[in-house]
Image (cartoon, grey):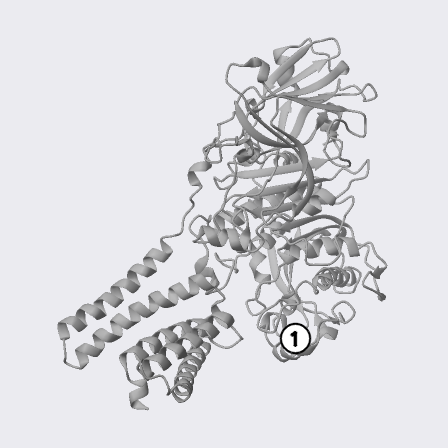
Amino acid sequence: MKKLLFQPVFLAVAILVIILFGVAGYHYAIGYPAWMTMLAGILAGILLLIALKLLLTWLLPFIKKVPLPLITTLLGGLISFYLLREFAFRWPSQLFYALVVFGFVCTALFVFGIWNIFQNKRKPLGIVLAAGGVLFAVLGFYGFNGLDGDPYADDVSQLKNLDVTTLADMGIQDPSNKGNFEVEVFTYGSGTDKKRPEYATAVKLKTPTVDASRLLPEWKGKKKKWREKYWGFGVDSFPLNARVYMPKGKGPFPMVMMVHGNHSMLDYSDGGYAYLGELLASRGIIGVSVDENFINGHWSGDFMGKEMPTRGWLLLKHLEQWRKWNTGDDSDMKGKVDLDNVVLVGHSRGGEAVSIAAAFNKLDRFPDNGNETFDFGFGIKGIVTIAPTDYRYNREMSLKDISYLSIQGAYDSDETSFWGMRPYHRLAFSKDFDGFKAGLYMNHANHGQFNSTWGRSDFGAPMKWLLNLEPLVSGEEQRQVAKVYVSAFAEDVLKGNRDYRPMLKNVDLVNNWLPQETYRSQYADNHKDVLVNFEGDIDITKTSSGIALGAKNFKVWREAELKSRDGGSQQNNALVLGWRYQSGNMDSIPVYRITLSDSLKNFSEADTLALSMAMGDISELKSNDEDEELESPDVGFNFSIMLTDSLGNSTSVALDDTNRLPSMIKTKFTKFEFLDKDMIGEPSEVQLKSCYVPVSSFMSVNDSLKLEKLKSINLIFDRDTLGVVILDDIGFYTKANIARE
């Protein structure tokens, strides 16, 4: 046995196996202390390696040319590493085995060096070898982490400084500033939660359990066994646990109810939104952060989206409990909440859950099992989705007449596309609905930092070591964006404070309240008369309302469905225009013309021309020369907008006179670009920006233009000799509509 095990090659392999198994064990959270799982991993690695070596020694005695101990050691090590990669590291094979080879070189040098030193053979050589192994390991560690960084930092230029009157300039208070209410913080829950003392002995109010058996029939098998062993309850007795941030005062107060997503069920998530709860409560809004950790995934398994209806339903059961308190005998809770003014906020899978809750709120029965009856009917006035999913539940939620906001980071490694814009596009408004829908896309923001406890990495170790974390904003900066936008949304939707509506339309108006980053804001409401949205049919020359569409001198002209970075659908169509011409050749300047029909109302009350815009893929303009290189500018492509009336009067302005043109936001999620391509998809995806041109800008150039006789809107691409743009939702806000806001 001694001859088999105490040899330099075996010891080098053994050390590497012990290190990697120890690392894997340390990060393999199963509810026990990390040092215990690390020791278990080390022990498993040692036993596995010894067992494999002994087994291979017994199986392979017929190999004579190569020393048997060397063969058994290497084969035992390879099998150990294979099992480690399959069940712990899960890195791409080429990276993991490159790490193994590099690690083996380092440990072999170190072990052979120490071996020579202790054998008193060649001490100087042993010192050199041992030091070389350590040096290579250190250089490898720093070299690996040196792959972090933003290779596209220079592509996002400092955009043109516009003379923008910010909301702060107008005397409007930053919505992330705390208000004047004192805040009481407490928890309610089952009172018997053996894992969460804050929901056991520390609860202020005890709540009943709820039976989710019909909503989550997948609670069975090993998931049922291990979860019930860990939590102490089953699907028929889910607790109603939550943290409450209550403004002190008589009430009733409006409510914002928040819910986390599918983080590790062992790393409790509900405390991660205290920064929002305390802010909202200080401004006179009850904040409630709901605990749904018991249906999150981990070693006990992931429900793979089958639990999504339960996530949404639980929010409504919490509201149901608040309704009981509101009409009950408890003087501290009676009449405390205005359940006709509720906003739901969801993060990650919670972002999909709030849409489900808003849809279920209007139903009489559970659509997947009609035996489960509903009796909710709460006044859910708005929903906010933060880095949400929109594909986990097998039903798509198409909501109506509810205000909506979605926030997404471009460096989100978990939900790598802005899925929150899909519910945005599906959301419909009745004619007189006075709400809105908005989206905010932020560069260098990830998935987890919107929750203060989830951390900087969107994956756990060892996968997180592959992530490119250096470009990320800090957690405080990322949560500042959430505070500004969630608070402004709540002020508008729950309190009718229209001061913040402009910032939801145009993020440039609040750049002094936000981290200095690149943003995209999209916005829509009933107050805009959209003339062309490129939906509904395949005719690119006219709309269903009779508006004629024409283009000349373009190399690219099409209406297309926008794609996410992984090739999925954004559920939105847009216009793609590409051009390329020689400077000075006026006859070749591209023009896209929207010719209005006589049946449309006159635009004498038009206040603002609005459109959504993004940069397209300039490689579409390549000629037959495959080696040709085309460079995109740092800023978006500029163009002129000309309005023409039926009397022949016309006037034009440049888009960038009043707008920051959108650049292309590109991301490098991992340390290796090939991994981004294989695991994530394209380095960017189209995210539109809402742009606005005041009608007064046109009239200041030519006040003879008759808006009541407006005949055409012409997009003239005379500012850049080549480019590709994506356009959508072209139309007008009117003075009457602006006044209504």
- Confirm whether residue 248 shows in the render: no
Residue 585, compared with residue 288, is above or below; it is: above
Where is the C terminus found, in terms of image quarters? top right
Residue that mark 1 sits on = 223
Residue 664, compared with residue 48, is above or below; it is: above
Residue 73, compared with residue 314, is above or below; it is: below
The amino acid sitting under disc 1 is: Lys
Residue 703: where, in percent of width, then height?
66, 10
Residue 111: where, in percent of width, then height?
26, 75
State the residue at coordinates (58%, 18%).
589
The answer to whether 10 appears left or right of 170 in the picture is left
Work out whether residue 653 or residue 120 is closer to the camera in this orientation and state it. 120
Q: Dot 1 lies on which element?
A: helix
Residue 255: where, in percent of width, then height?
70, 52
The answer to whether 667 appears left or right of 438 in the picture is left
Work out whether residue 515 or residue 245 is closer to the camera in this orientation and state it. 515
Residue 397, compared with residue 585, is above or below; it is: below
Residue 391: where, in percent of width, then height?
68, 55
